[in-house]
Image: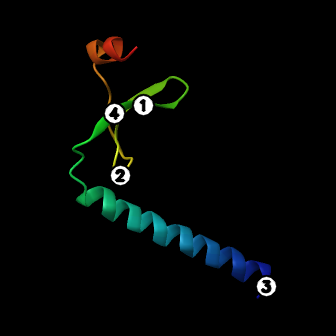
Amino acid sequence: MGKNQKVQNIKNNIHNLELELKIIQGECKHTNQTIKIIKPGEVRWVCDDCEIKIKWPSPYELKEWL
């Protein structure tokens, strides 16, 4: 198997896994949520089960979280 074919296989696997993740996240009820730091300067409500970013915390929620 050449490098080009390996690269294509990896890309196909990534694509298939991303589709599977979207399906799981779409079916999740997001009942367990936590405020988390996504990256520096970005804080969001995140589902604890499927890890999808749900919403921005309100200023009050952010203050209580800190």
Neighbour tally class for label 4: few under 14, some 14-19, many 20 plus, Cα within 10 Å: some
Q: Amino acid at mark 3?
A: Gly
Q: Earlier in the sequence, mark 4 or mark 3?
A: 3
> Disc 1 to disc 2, how far (Cα)?
14 Å
Per the image, label 2 sits on a secondary structure element best described as loop
Instruction: Tell us which disc is closer to us: 3 or 2.
Output: 2
Q: Which residue is mark 2?
A: 50
Residue at 79% in and 85% down:
2
Numbered badge on residue 36:
1
Quarter of the figure with the N terminus: bottom right
Answer whether labels 1 and 4 touch (C-beta < 8 Å).
yes
Q: Is residue 18 left or right of residue 32?
A: right
Instruction: In this rendered view, identify the residue nearer to me: 11 or 62.
Output: 62
Q: Earlier in the sequence, mark 2 or mark 4?
A: 4
- Residue extending furthest toward the right: 2
Answer whether labels 2 and 4 touch (C-beta < 8 Å).
no
> Disc 3 to disc 2, how far (Cα)?
35 Å
Q: Amino acid at mark 2?
A: Cys
Q: Which residue is mark 4?
A: 34
Instruction: In this rendered view, identify the residue nearer to me: 54 or 7.
Output: 54
> Disc 4 to disc 3, how far (Cα)?
44 Å
> Disc 1 to disc 4, how far (Cα)?
6 Å
Q: Which residue is mark 3?
A: 2
> Disc 1 to disc 3, how far (Cα)?
42 Å
> Disc 2 to disc 4, how far (Cα)?
12 Å
Residue at 36% in and 17% down:
65
Q: Amino acid at mark 1?
A: Lys
